[in-house]
Amino acid sequence: MTKVKIFDIIMVLFNWKKVFRLSRGNLHTCLNIMRMLTYDTIPQNKYDPLYTYKGFDFIGESFLVNPKTLFENAYKYTQREVGTYISLAATRNLANFLATGDITVDTLLLPEDEIIFEEINNNRLLSVDSEGKLHFLYEEVPQEKIVWH
């Protein structure tokens, strides 16, 4: 099982390198595998494209927080934007998230590659704040509950 529930937060743990390698870098296949992991879908038959990947263990230390929200809104974005979102989310430190709840990535930890920063700037799902932290649109978790009196 790749889903973990911690304090009403649903997380999907996965190994992005394995997903990318087994899909041979095909973005459409990567996203289908991630949907399969998120929704625990079962292939309809042996002709279903997911049939090939159902037996693999994709558990790893990469994670998405509440990924169903991302996939429910994916129709608003290009596959490239969603793929970039997932691949950059895979760079986060799971231990840091479990200890502090921080879901951002410090841009100083990303490889110094113009293409990566160009992708971030052109992606509507990602934003960088003034401190150089990369934020993920559909993973912002409220830090405290709102209580109405």
Image (cartoon, helix red, strand yellow):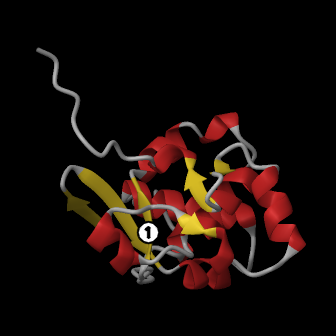
Q: Quadrant of the N terminus?
A: bottom left
With 146 as the anchor, is 149 left or right in this view?
left
Q: Is residue 108 above or below residue 88?
A: below
Q: Which residue is painted at 51% across and 62% down in the image?
A: 104
Secondary structure under badge 1?
A: strand
* Rendering coords of residue 132 (x, y %): 65, 62
Residues 41 and 27: in front is 27
Q: Quadrant of the C terminus?
A: top left
Question: On the image, which quarter does residue 147 sit in?
Answer: top left
Which residue has dot 1 on it? 63
Whether residue 104 can be seen here: yes
* Rendering coords of residue 106 (x, y %): 59, 70
Question: On the image, which quarter does residue 58 sit in?
Answer: bottom left
* Rendering coords of residue 121 (x, y %): 80, 52
Whether residue 43 can be seen here: no
Q: Is residue 136 above or below residue 133?
A: above
